[in-house]
Image (tube, helix red, strand yellow):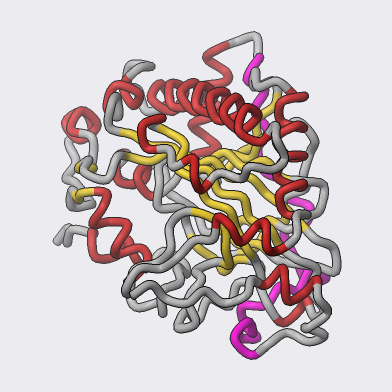
């Protein structure tokens, strides 16, 4: 029997039912954000101009960013700025709809599985000790045959056309970034795109962080790495993203018209650890915040392991066991974290003893 969904966090906040943070959302003192003590506050993510004159310079910037950060920002990326703005607007309008309208596409958990698509809170089941002050709308967008349009909002009326156009452009940008990452690893530009040709998927996830009465005791999203290959993140103007760098949390300042890009766990596996997926988290404030993440990932039946060409060239042994992506996702969500990802513990079981 499907689990009975609880009222979303957004609804509770907007109806004035929460003047303090409930116990389920409290995080340990050591995990709380202390912006006044942010020692890395003046450090900023690398910024890559994708219209840079010298292609080789851009490739080298990508290499350094992937090795040293696992994150970077891109500008002059080719995605129409007006389309980005329209996409943000249709999602704002969706989250401004009455709860009854949003709830028509509610994500529902079947048996003990996590709800994977639709609208709801982070995990949507009462047993989930998520401690995440956020709701979300999650949609499978590529391949087109996998779209469940019955879970796409009907309002605003421009939603479907706008999101389809945006996802198409995000896919093109991800392909260009994949080419640059391939080159930065010393491979042919088309290597990663060919590797995933016909074996990839795109998932769009909009995270909505309602205003919080006690921002210092909870988190919008706990620390984690992304389980996919490449993530494009479109932020609104409210600050909330932090990236871990040299054991310090760096706050990422949103810039209109830019994307934040990060490599996920699959790139770490494919590169045999040359490039690392990096922990990041989201904090909240008295202001609402929305971010739009586009995840590029292998198809569920794709087996991912270290790239043989890289191993042969460097005469090195594989550091990770190959694994089917569907099995990897299961370990990501169920590896003893009370159904909520935290940190990078899920990669540990894939490491091969090098002794």
Q: Residue at x 37, y 66 (%)?
A: 333
Q: Residue at x 65, y 66 (%)?
A: 134
Number of on-image labels: 0
Please state which of residues 224 and 39 is positioned toward the viewer in this rendering: 224
Residue 189 in the image, given as x and y percentages of width and height? 38, 16
Q: Is residue 42 magenta?
A: yes
Judge left or right: residue 49 versus residue 231.
right
Q: Residue at x 43, y 57 (%)?
A: 116
Outermost residue, bottom direction? 23
Outermost residue, top direction? 53
Instruction: Using the rendered view, name the quadrant where residue 18 is placed.
Output: bottom right
Judge left or right: residue 15 versus residue 206.
right
Q: Residue at x 53, y 76 (%)?
A: 130
* Vertical arrangement, residue 89 with respect to residue 30, above or below: above
Q: Which residues are magenta?
A: 23-51
Q: Quadrant of the N terminus?
A: bottom left
* Vertical arrangement, residue 38 with respect to residue 234, above or below: below
Please state which of residues 58 and 291 is positioned toward the viewer in this rendering: 291
Q: Is residue 103 magenta?
A: no
Q: Quadrant of the C terminus?
A: bottom left
Please state which of residues 47 and 266 is positioned toward the viewer in this rendering: 266
Instruction: Using the rendered view, name the quadrant where residue 354 is placed.
Output: bottom left
Residue 194 in the image, given as x and y percentages of width and height? 29, 21
Please state which of residues 208 and 124 is positioned toward the viewer in this rendering: 124
Residue 310 in the image, given as x and y percentages of width and height? 24, 31
Work out whether residue 245 can be spotted. Answer: no
Work out whether residue 135 can be spotted. Answer: yes
Residue 149 in the image, given as x and y percentages of width and height? 49, 40
């Amino acid at each position: 029997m499907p689990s009975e969904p609880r009222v979303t966090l957004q609804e509770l906040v907007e109806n004035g039912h929460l003047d303090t943070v409930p116990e389920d959302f409290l995080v340990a003192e050591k995990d709380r954000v202390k912006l006044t003590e942010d020692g890395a506050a003046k450090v900023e993510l690398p910024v890559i101009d994708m219209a840079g004159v010298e292609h080789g310079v851009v490739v080298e910037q990508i290499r350094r960013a992937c090795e040293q950060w696992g994150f970077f920002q891109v500008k002059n990326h080719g995605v129409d700025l007006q389309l980005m703005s329209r996409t943000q607007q249709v999602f704002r309008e969706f989250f401004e709809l009455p709860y009854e309208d949003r709830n028509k596409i509610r994500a529902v958990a079947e048996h003990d599985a996590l709800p994977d698509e639709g609208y709801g809170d982070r995990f949507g089941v009462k047993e989930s000790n998520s401690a995440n002050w956020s709701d979300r709308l999650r949609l499978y967008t590529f391949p087109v045959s996998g779209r469940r349009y019955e879970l796409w909002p009907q309002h605003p009326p421009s939603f479907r056309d706008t999101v389809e156009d945006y996802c198409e452009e995000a896919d093109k940008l991800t392909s260009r970034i994949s080419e640059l990452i391939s080159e930065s690893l010393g491979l042919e530009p088309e290597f990663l795109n060919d590797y995933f040709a016909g074996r990839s998927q795109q998932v769009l996830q909009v995270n909505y962080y309602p205003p919080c009465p006690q921002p210092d005791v909870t988190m919008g999203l706990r620390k984690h790495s992304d389980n996919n290959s490449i993530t494009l993140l479109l932020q609104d103007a409210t600050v909330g993203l932090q990236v871990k760098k040299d054991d310090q949390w760096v706050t990422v300042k949103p810039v209109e018209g830019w994307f934040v890009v990060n490599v996920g766990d699959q790139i770490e596996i494919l590169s045999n650890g040359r490039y690392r997926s990096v922990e990041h988290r989201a904090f909240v404030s008295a202001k609402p915040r929305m971010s739009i993440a586009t995840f590029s990932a292998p198809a569920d039946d794709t087996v991912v392991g270290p790239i043989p060409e890289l191993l042969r060239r460097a005469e090195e042994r594989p550091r990770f066991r190959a694994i089917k992506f569907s099995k990897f996702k299961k370990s990501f969500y169920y590896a003893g974290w009370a159904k909520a990802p935290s940190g990078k513990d899920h990669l540990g079981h894939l490491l091969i003893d090098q002794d």
